[in-house]
Image (cartoon, rainbow, N blue to C red):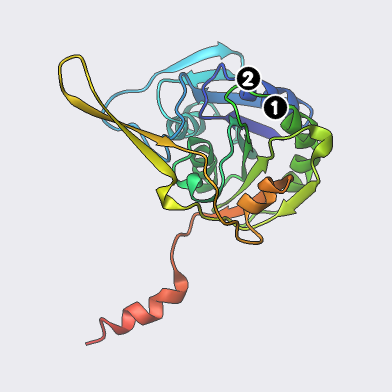
Amino acid sequence: MRILLTNDDGIHAPGLELLEAIAARLSDDVWVCAPAEEQSGAGHSLTLHQPVRLRRFGEKRFAVTGTPTDSVNLALRKLFDDRMPDLVISGINAGENLADDITYSGTISAAMEGALAGIPAIALSQAMRERGASYAVAEAWAEKVLPPLVEVPMAKRTLVNVNFPDRAADAVKGIRVVRQGFHDYDRGSLVEGTDPRGRSYYWFGLEEMEHTLDHGTDLEAVADGYIAVTPLQLDLTNHAAIGALAERFVA
């Protein structure tokens, strides 16, 4: 099995180093193509207005001067002449990617790019209360989570989002397959300041806050100490709304 690894934290991120070690126990044909620098929050952005460069860090290790989407896109177009990867794994992200945060996540978007190419894809994230905290849960549980996901046939344009809770590895309660939740939108922060030239600038942030957890969601599962496994689809169509909208345009 050929596996392509990527992330949004950059080629030197400790989460990627751990993922390489885990993937090496699943396959002897593991490739890495990740952003040269951290690209957290890049979403599914593609670099169009400047060139990107591909730098080799080893026989099967490469970095791209662009986004996570650029990394997967370039890898699939340039690195695999004989055959494409059988699996794309993105992560292990420093911080959870839950609920509507998946729309901003470079980690998720890198996996999306694999799914768009028709390749089964998985995104892995480790919840952390503090930046640089331990990946112990991901290290202990990834080999229990990944094999079943690798074995199950995935529908086209589908990826799986996995989030490990922030707690001791032996305190994890198990694995739950759950749906995507939604945060309260007003949890974000906006800091306004003035630069040395007297011009205003704005800095977005995300603050921790209490919110009501819907049952059966990724938010609830991780908060309760479970590993959340959520299948995501790239078809964003609200199929139930098609009929009602179509009636508005009947001549």
**Residue reaching furthest to the left:** 198
For marks 1 and 2, the one nearer the N-term is 2
> Looking at the picture, which amino acid does disc 1 mark?
Tyr
Q: Are dots 1 and 2 in contact, CB under 8 Å?
A: yes
Q: Secondary structure at mark 2?
A: helix
Q: 215 and 29: which one is in front? A: 215
Q: 215 and 94: which one is in front? A: 215
Q: Quadrant of residue 168?
A: top right
Q: Position of residue 234 (x, y in %)?
A: 49, 54
Please say if 198 is above or below 26: above
Q: Does residue 23 appear to the left or right of 155 in the view shown?
A: right
Q: Which residue is mark 1?
A: 135
How far apart, in angstroms, are the residues tagged by discs 1 and 2? 9 Å
Q: Does residue 133 appear to the left or right of 199 in the view shown?
A: right
Q: Position of residue 54 (x, y in %)?
A: 44, 18
| Residue occupying image coordinates x 59% and y 44% | 119
For the C terminus, the quadrant is bottom left
Q: Does residue 192 appear to the left or right of 171 in the view shown?
A: left
Q: 192 and 80: which one is in front? A: 192
| Residue occupying image coordinates x 74% and y 44% | 225
**Residue reaching furthest to the front:** 210
Residue 14, disc: 2
**Residue reaching furthest to the bottom:** 251
